[in-house]
Image: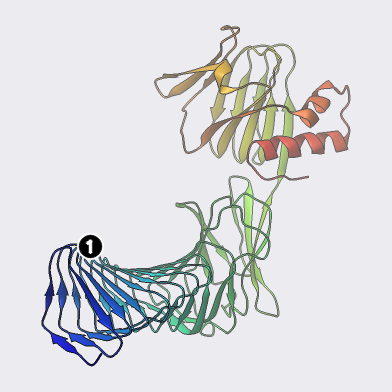
Amino acid sequence: SGGIVRNMAITSKGMQIVLAGGAVSNCSTGTDGVQHVSGGTTYNTLVRPNGAQRVSTGKAIGTIVSNGGSQIISSGGIASSAKIYSGGSQYVRLGGSAVKTNALAGGKLFVSSGGKALTATVASGGIAYIFKGAVTSALTVQAAGTAYLYGGALSGTNTFSGATVNVMGTGVKINKINANSATTLNYAISNMQAGAGVMLAESVQQNLSCSFSITAGKAQQIGTYKLSSKLNVADNTVFSIKLGSTSLGTAKLNGAALTKNGVTYKLTDDAAGTVSLTLSMKAGNMLKGSTGADTLTGTASSDIFYGGKGNDTITGTNGRDVAVYAKAAWGQDTIQATNGTMTLLFGGLSASDITQAKNGTNLVLTRKSDTSQKITVQGWNDSTHKIVYVDTLTEFNKYLNAASPTTAQTTAARNEVWQKAGLAAKA
């Protein structure tokens, strides 16, 4: 207590403990060296590669974290004006606080549940990770900086001008944001649920034409998703719509919708300022072949094909098409998909029942128990084609066995096929 240390170098694998009343300035850590701040105060510590500064019930002011180094702030610890350089990391954990952190290019800021990061700045090339239960205030992510929001609350005014902000989880709460036309907000939640997303307690700058981007891991799921509350964006503001990392096109708020591959993306807001993205998929045809050779051609919507026996030719045109193969025998089929996607859904079969072989750009699937049964998928593409195996197709088999399927049977069969193919259900 009361001791002062200046200009000390902590040797490789060495340790320095700064207790209550102690003060250390201008020290540095060697490889695997550790400085423990437990009640005392440090000034301008340099954390070198593989070194660490651990702050608990003490204060660390002006710490510099270099490549491979880390600063860890836990319960009772406070870090102020830290600079995190490329390859360095700052971890703000339960009960810890960081004030005026500057994550420079290549530097990373992690704020865990119960941790606080106040007036942090993420510079160009820097990254911030905000997790559920974390608290930040007045976060600034500069142009070409990136933030990943897995949860947490962002109070104060948060500035994202020219930044990329990725919303990775539900329940993110942002008090207020300032942005510009170069700001990108990626809504990257897989299996989105109604009401999930970013909740803004206050307004974005009035009538600001931000380029918000919506990325959904399963964007074909139908429903209305609340993106934000009190998001004051002018009508006809252009939103970029993405599926995963693939850009689908643009839609306008309360204006022109986007229709792509049979799915329509509509952006609207209401009097309360809630912006919603509604996805809808027009139900295509159920195209059923005979026991002979058939030519089945799809529509501009999402279609379901069943060729049955015989050597069939199946052509998908647009939308999210599905070719169904039940346990019953089929012939030697050819599948063509000009646009959109094509899913081969095998009911009552497993991958061990089928042999796959590439033939140029085509994929040939042969049934092991009867090699005369083959399916040739022309122009196979991993990004637009997929194969799904399921144990049963109860409703679809009822549809097949019905002499004159009712509307209810057709709807149930269609919903089952799309659901088991991993696509959206649609009556």
The residue at 15%/83% (across/down) is: 26
Q: Which residue is mark 1?
A: 68
Q: Horizontal and vertical percent for residue 292?
A: 71, 11
Residue 163 sits in which quadrant?
Answer: bottom left
Residue positioned most to the bottom: 2
Nearer-the-camera pick, 226 or 27:
27
- Circle 1 — which element? loop
Quadrant position of the C terminus in the picture: top right
Q: Horizontal and vertical percent for residue 260?
A: 57, 49
Nearer-the-camera pick, 203 or 52:
52
Left or right position of 67 against 265: left
Residue 369 sits in which quadrant?
Answer: top right
Residue 29 sits in which quadrant?
Answer: bottom left
Q: Please rate how many residues cluster around mark 1, counting C-alpha atoms within 10 Å: few if below 14, some from 14 to 19, many from 20.
A: some
Judge whether 14 appears above or below 282 on screen: below
Query: Type of residue at label 1?
Result: Gly
The residue at 43%/77% (across/down) is: 75
Q: Horizontal and vertical percent for residue 49?
A: 18, 64
The residue at 81%/37% (across/down) is: 412
Nearer-the-camera pick, 146 or 339:
146
Left or right position of 420 against 364: right
Residue positioned most to the front: 1
